[in-house]
Image: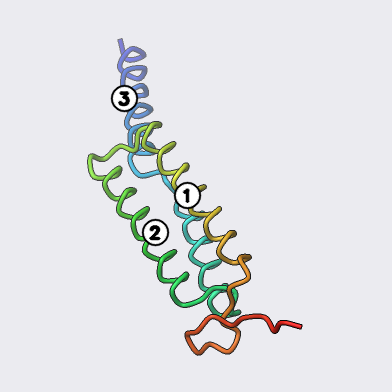
Amino acid sequence: MKSIGYVVAGALVWSLAGVAAAQSNTAGLDQRQANQARRIDQGQASGQLTPKEAKRLDRQENRIERMESRAKADGVVTPRERAHLARAQTRESQRIARQKHDRQHDFNHDGRVDRPHRR
């Protein structure tokens, strides 16, 4: 009889641990978001991003954070919500790369786009 009680207790602990892990286990998403924010900051500091581009990318990052908050609001981030967040972060990563390499620079940090000299 005791062994059945241990099995039931073990199953209960195991299922609760799984639910707790599924509720807010978005460490990978959070790390990726931090990396993308760092890329935006680095791009602005180096002049690869203009202030307007950086502001637009930051707004998009905030939008993804709100999406994540809504996904966590019910206590469980479903695989579908996780995939939706991952797609949004992939698109944002592509936008960051495209904006950093689009030949619009602000190397002197005056808020204007620096144009390459024509020869």
111 lies left or right of 4? right
- Name the foreground residue: 102 vs 117: 117
Marking on residue 22: none
Q: Amino acid at mark 1?
A: Gln
Residue sitting at 30 percent across and 42 percent down? 71
Residue under label 2, please give it.
60
Q: Amino acid at mark 2?
A: Gln
- Name the foreground residue: 103 vs 89: 103
Q: Are marks 3 and 2 in contact (CB under 8 Å)?
A: no
Residue under label 1, please give it.
89
Residue under label 3, please give it.
12
Task: Give the spatial CA distance, label 1 vs label 2.
Answer: 10 Å
Numbered disc total: 3
Quadrant in which residue 84 is drawn: top left
Residue sitting at 34 percent across and 26 percent down? 15
- Name the foreground residue: 20 vs 102: 102
